[in-house]
Image (cartoon, rainbow, N blue to C red):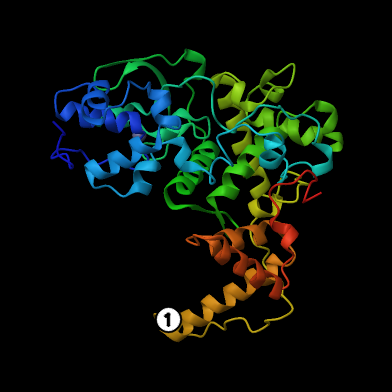
């Protein structure tokens, strides 16, 4: 007998909850295990937690959306596959994936100093085995496991301001906290800030950086770029070596997290990954404060806006603040501000590939067919924004 279309009980998923966690909670509301729910209700063989959370069969996700009445995008976002292209370019390792993801931007070092290492089969952020990490405070109030806790992209809980910890077992059944003593350090403010920004990227799709908000996709790549720069060979730092040493001294970890030979961030142990995240956070803090030399093409994103306005050459008229600035702006004023900032963004996009890409991503959002995207590209041509700024699939280095 076919079960009813819609399940009467289905706990709402928490923000960024993983699919395996949500299924476990749905199953529990019927007194079942999730493999029983998968088999009897959905006709699906048992899938491990990492299989469920990475890229489960599409028909399973569609069926889950039907059974729970949840929006399909919301269900998809509980899996890593749902985060293509924001967090991952693809889940299939492709030649040139590392260069595309990690070498397009640059923060600390000029781009030409970095193109030395690139693993062949590589996916960003994905650890080899299903990592079990979580916030003890979050898990004490609910057995909800978040998708992003599994990835070395975030090291603390922005809600409770504490480090994520490693555990064994399964929340709700039993949990044994297993963080080694050397990883139990206080959470530095710089790391807390970086993780709050990452959390903002995950939950809102953009990050407020000192200069202007950037698209989440840019933020993830900017962070991964900095992690790469902090592990590059010592000889590549040139005159910046002292600066980079200062970053490591500032966070109290060995230079390059003690790595003797290079390997990609994803394959490192969580202890070294945390040290690298801390170093990246310190580097960002120092760049923002103007006390670290950053020669990369994207470093300006981390620096505050210069005090004097840089004219865009086309739209001089800045909005004049009148004496009654406290008054609520009228719709006319708000509209003018929106146009001014759009004008400034277009002017900046003509010069800066990152802004161009960001503007394109924002404008492309919601465009569902190739024709609309082509029309958007034509608009960029009319606005004189170079289209090669948008190139993603590149053998050559677009920002070099
Ligand atoms: Zn928490």
Percent of width and height locating residue 310: 71, 71
Tell me the element at label 1: loop
**Closer to the camera in the image, 163 or 82:** 82
Dot 1 crowding, Cα within 10 Å, few <14, some 14–19, many 20+: few
Q: Is residue 358 above or below residue 146?
A: below
Image quarter of the N terminus: top left
Q: Is residue 86 above or below residue 228?
A: below
Going by the image, does 137 lie left or right of 51? left
Q: Is residue 314 above or below residue 25?
A: below
Q: What residue sits right under mark 1 in the picture?
A: 329
Going by the image, does 372 lie left or right of 29? right
Percent of width and height locating residue 142: 25, 31
Identified at 31% across, 26% down, the residue is: 44
Percent of width and height locating residue 120: 71, 27
Quadrant location of ligand 1?
A: top left
Identified at 70% across, 34% down, the residue is: 95
Percent of width and height locating residue 188: 52, 33
* Quarter location, residue 280: top right
Camera sees residue 143: no
**Closer to the camera in the image, 58 or 206:** 58
Q: Is residue 112 above or below residue 378?
A: above
* Quarter location, residue 283: top right
């Amino acid at each position: 007998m076919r079960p009813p279309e819609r399940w009467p009980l289905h706990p709402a998923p928490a923000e960024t909850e993983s699919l395996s966690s949500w299924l476990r909670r749905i199953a529990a509301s019927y007194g079942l295990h999730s493999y029983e729910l998968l088999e009897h209700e959905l006709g699906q063989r048992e899938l491990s937690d990492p299989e469920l959370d990475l890229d489960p069969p599409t028909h399973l996700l569609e069926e889950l959306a039907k059974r729970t009445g949840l929006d399909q995008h919301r269900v998809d976002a509980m899996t890593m596959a749902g985060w293509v292209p924001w967090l991952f370019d693809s889940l299939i390792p492709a030649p040139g994936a590392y260069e595309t993801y990690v070498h397009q931007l640059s923060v600390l070092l000029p781009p030409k100093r970095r193109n030395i290492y690139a693993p062949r089969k590589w996916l960003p952020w994905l650890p080899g085995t299903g990592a079990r990490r979580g916030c003890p405070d979050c898990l004490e109030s609910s057995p909800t496991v978040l998708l992003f806790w599994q990835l070395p992209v975030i090291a603390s809980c922005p809600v409770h301001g504490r480090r994520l910890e490693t555990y064994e077992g399964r929340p709700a059944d039993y949990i044994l906290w297993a963080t080694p003593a050397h990883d139990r350090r206080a959470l530095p403010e710089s790391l807390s800030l970086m993780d709050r920004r990452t959390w903002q990227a995950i939950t809102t799709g953009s990050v407020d950086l000192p200069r202007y908000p950037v698209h989440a996709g840019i933020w993830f790549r900017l962070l991964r770029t900095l992690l790469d720069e902090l592990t590059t060979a010592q000889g590549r730092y040139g005159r910046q070596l002292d600066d980079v040493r200062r970053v490591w001294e500032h966070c109290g970890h060995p230079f390059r997290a003690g790595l003797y030979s290079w390997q990609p961030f994803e394959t490192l142990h969580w202890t070294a990954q945390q040290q690298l995240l801390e170093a990246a956070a310190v580097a960002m803090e120092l760049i923002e404060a103007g006390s670290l030399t950053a020669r990369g093409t994207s470093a300006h994103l981390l620096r505050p806006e210069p005090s004097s306005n840089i004219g865009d050459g086309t739209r001089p008229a800045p909005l004049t603040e009148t004496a009654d600035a406290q008054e609520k702006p009228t719709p006319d004023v708000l509209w003018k501000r929106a146009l001014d900032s759009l004008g400034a963004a277009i002017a900046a996009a003509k010069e800066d590939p990152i802004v161009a890409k960001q503007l394109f991503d924002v404008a492309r959002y919601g465009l569902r067919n190739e024709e609309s995207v082509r029309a958007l590209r034509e608009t960029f041509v009319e606005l004189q924004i170079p289209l090669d700024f948008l190139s993603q699939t590149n053998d050559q280095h677009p920002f070099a």
